[in-house]
Image (spheres, rainbow, N blue to C red):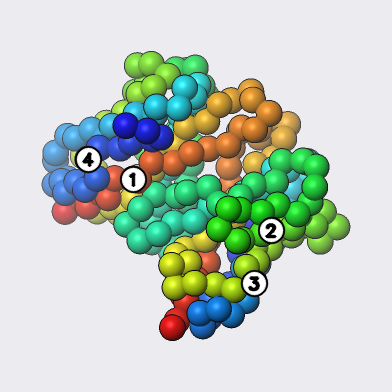
Amino acid sequence: AQSVTQLDSQVPVFEEAPVELRCNYSSSVSVYLFWYVQYPNQGLQLLLKYLSGSTLVESINGFEAEFNKSQTSFHLRKPSVHISDTAEYFCAVMAGGTSYGKLTFGQGTILTVHP
Amino acid sequence: ETGVTQTPRHLVMGMTNKKSLKCEQHLGHNAMYWYKQSAKKPLELMFVYNFKEQTENNSVPSRFSPECPNSSHLFLHLHTLQPEDSALYLCASSDRGSSTDTQYFGPGTRLTVL
């Protein structure tokens, strides 16, 4: 079985500062990795995903995440945040094999961007 | 409509009521999912339907009854719920078997059980 740990439940930062949201996973098989974002009173929106190929993946709004197999991590970063990035961010893993198709989520990290 | 839609967006019900949640996907996907999101807990997968067949029931109590009449629609029938069932219920869909099997979520139904 796979599991996901998001190391920070809340991350407060000031506008235009860099941010890193940490995610570690465990799985005995190959994995696909995802970051979702949830704005207040809304559902989850896919931010970015790693399926194969380049270990660095980017979103259209400036976020990036790097798949590190040796450290079993998939941390999310942004060099300069905006007020509008305030939301809850979820890391998720989908394992291959018999668990294919089942997403396991972390507990979420609330990012609050202050002016 | 585009993406995944859910109705109603908010629902308040008593423990003796019967209600249903509806989900519709407009993405041409073949798999649909129900998740429960409670405060301070990770998202919990409840049910999975693949080509209208239920392939996963994650030990969900029988007071939750899913129905998938076709690959575009998914329902969650609710009866004799408990206050601890109050949560955000999220529906998702994906294209199972594709090289990019990614789940897309609806906005959710906020359920309050009195």
Q: Would you name the residue on which mark 4 appears?
A: B8
The chain holding disc 1 is B
Q: For the residues marked 2 and 4, what is the alpha-carbon distance in whole angstroms?
A: 35 Å
Q: Are marks 3 and 2 on the same chain?
A: yes
SS assignment at label 2: strand
| 3 and 1 marks in contact (CB < 8 Å) | no
Q: Residue at x 33, y 36 (%)?
A: B5
Q: Nearer the viewer, residue A75 or B110?
A: A75
At label 2, the amino acid type is Ala
Q: Would you name the residue on which mark 2 appears?
A: A65
Q: Residue at x 16, y 49 (%)?
A: B12
Quadrant that contains the N terminus of chain A: top right
Quadrant that contains the C terminus of chain A: bottom left
Q: Nearer the viewer, residue A39 or B113?
A: A39
- The answer to whether residue A109 is left or right of residue A75 is left
At label 3, the amino acid type is Pro
Q: Would you name the residue on which mark 1 appears?
A: B108
Q: Would you name the residue on which mark 3 appears?
A: A79
SS assignment at label 4: loop
Tag in front: 2 or 4: 2
SS assignment at label 1: loop
Q: Residue at x 49, y 56 (%)?
A: A37
SS assignment at label 3: loop
- Can you see residue A4? yes
Q: Are marks 4 and 3 on the same chain?
A: no
Q: For the residues marked 1 and 4, what is the alpha-carbon distance in whole angstroms?
A: 8 Å
Q: For the residues marked 2 and 1, what is the alpha-carbon distance in whole angstroms?
A: 26 Å
- The answer to whether residue A10 is left or right of residue A26 is left
